[in-house]
Image (cartoon, rainbow, N blue to C red):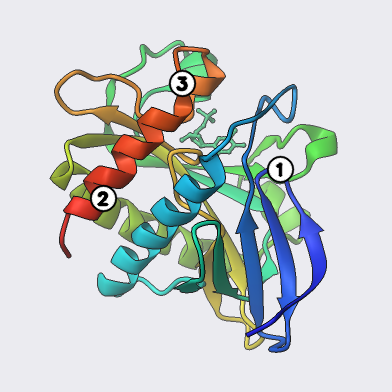
Amino acid sequence: MEKAELLYEGKAKKMFATEDKQVIWVEYLDQATALNGVMKDQIQGKGELNNQITSRIFQYLTKKGIDNHFIDILSKTEQLVKKVEVIPLEVVVRNFAAGSFSKRLAVPEGTLLPEPIIEFYYKDDSLDDPFINEAHIAFLELATPAEIQEIKLIALQVNEALQELFAGIGLQLIDFKLEFGRLADGKILLADEISPDTCRLWDSDSHEHMDKDVYRRKIGNLVPVYQEVLARLNNYSF
Ligand code: TMP
């Protein structure tokens, strides 16, 4: 498979066409951003870590019967994925209070939620990715009510599977963000990436942050933390 023209350059990834219209070539970049681009840094090695971590997690989800866009890892920084029509939503699943949830509702970080809570954010940088509900999604025609039900169902299945995976490598899954798309036939498919950029992971024993909060909160160096997450994932057999 050959890499063709650049289709899109995001904050952490470049997407290229291939000779197969249904397949996208993704290159993970060494860039870290936070606060909608207010914080921006080049971090050498981050691209290859997130590419390898995401690939491993999607391979695990496939094994668990959760269909997703991942096709194959090509190199340290590149992977092939199925082309989808992106649904402009960030779907956040929370198991414990943290981050914006804790801030908005004044709930201490680390508080266990009795049930997972699903939230939706409208992916629009000019609006700063606002928090929206299902009525807003219907009004904006981002997804149909049936599609939203399907997305919520898949998000909860992913949560179950990821909690099991991360518990197996000594990490608590505090919260995470998913993105979805539509295949040509309209089927909803899990897409984008799943990595310490898009999950909050706390060490089960020490409760140390093992995710992008290390960067967002200027706690320490991101690379050794992501290396540790990848090493644990690679040692976990599934
Ligand atoms: P939040 O607490 O800042 O709303 O973040 C919830 C989860 O979603 C956390 O695991 C980080 C992830 N996330 C992203 O992946 N991208 C984003 O743009 C934001 C705001 C959060």
- Pick whichever of labels 1 and 2 is earlier in the sequence: 1
x, y percent for residue 40? 71, 26
Rounded to the nearest angstrom, the CA distance separating label 3 from label 2 is: 19 Å
Rounded to the nearest angstrom, the CA distance separating label 1 from label 3 is: 19 Å
Instruction: Look at the numbered disc 2 and give the secondary structure of its residue.
Output: helix
- Pick whichever of labels 1 and 3 is earlier in the sequence: 1
- Which residue has dot 1 on it? 11
Q: The disc labelled 2 sits on which kind of residue?
A: Leu
Residue at the spot 42% in from the left edge and 61% down from the top edge: 55
- Which residue has dot 2 on it? 233
Residue 95, quarter of the rendered image: top left
Residue at the spot 40% in from the left edge and 51% down from the top edge: 53
Q: The disc labelled 1 sits on which kind of residue?
A: Lys
x, y percent for residue 148? 55, 61
Of residue 47 and residue 197, the one placed in the foreground of this image is 47
Instruction: Answer yes or no: disc 2 within 8 Å of ligand 1.
Output: no
Mark 2: few/some/many CA within 10 Å (<14, 14-19, 20+): many
For the image shown, how many numbered marks are present on the structure? 3
Residue at the spot 45% in from the left edge and 31% down from the top edge: 223
Q: Which label number is shown at residue 221?
A: 3
